[in-house]
Image (tube, rainbow, N blue to C red):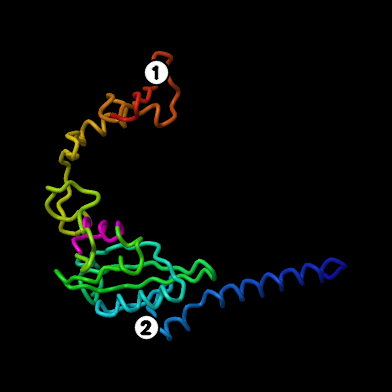
Amino acid sequence: MTGPESKPEASLKDLAARSTRRLAESRDVTPLLGELGLQAEGGLEPTATVEAGRLLDTARQLRARGFMLLDIVGVDYTRYPTPRPAPLAVLYSVAHPGDHRRLFLRVWLAEGQEVDSLFSVWKAANYLEREVYDLLGVEFTGHPDLRKVLTPDDLEGHPLRKDFPLGETPTLFRDGRFLDPAAFRAGLSGQQRGLTGYRGELRRGERRREDIVPPLMPEGGPK
């Protein structure tokens, strides 16, 4: 059906299509990968494999082009259903704040293999690398302060490893407080106050009885 409004409508659709196409072209990292000598992996997000020995140099080239580090995550592939190049991998998410190009770098690592720290390139790598070290056990060469950041110092193993035992043990914090799983669940379910200080029905938004008063925050913050 044609009419007086059909042409403007078609023009708007064409304009939107051209804008979408230009946006996709501007975010295409294929030329960038060619400049860096990297090969793209197949996947929904642009990802390239980087050899551990080339990671630091690649990061410096990306920094020189205006890219910033967004995140670092570690993955244990030891029980992956299909064969992988190595049991462990570290993924780096980088993005350009100007043209919004985004790229993931994957570094495959053998058990016990170290990888260069990117702290000298991006200061944001500090706590991100400490988190991967804590949860996966990957060591970053050249990191200025590679210590645990999430788990207790005396915890054996790394929680994101596939061989890490699943169970419930009280978690002890440095200041002497501890989190007991059974008491914590009881507080969430409403059976008792537990260590959370809240009853479950208040969290779930259920109709409150008049005799139930929400706990107040202690003076000076949580104890």
Label 2 secondary element: loop
Residue 136 included in the magenta stretch of the image = yes
- Of the residues shown, which amino acid type is indicated by label 2? Leu
Q: Quadrant of residue 211?
A: top left
Q: Quadrant of residue 50?
A: bottom left
- Residue at image x 17%, y 73%? 110
Where 200 falls versus 97 (above or below)? above
- Residue at image x 48%, y 84%? 31
Quadrant assignment for the N terminus = bottom right
61 or 169: nearer the viewer: 61
Residue reaching furthest right?
4
Q: Quadrant of residue 67?
A: bottom left
Mark 1 Cα shell of 10 Å, populated few (<14), some (14-19), many (≥20):
few
Which residue is label 2 attached to? Answer: 38
- Of the residues shown, which amino acid type is indicated by label 1? Val
Range drawn in magenta: 127-138
Which residue is label 1 attached to? Answer: 213
- Residue 94: percent from the left, percent from the top? 41, 68
- Residue at image x 21%, y 72%? 109
- Residue at image x 23%, y 61%? 144
Question: Could you tell whether 120 is left or right of 17 in the image?
Answer: left
Quadrant assignment for the C terminus = top left
Where 11 falls versus 151 (above or below)? below
Q: CA distance from mark 2 to mark 1?
A: 60 Å
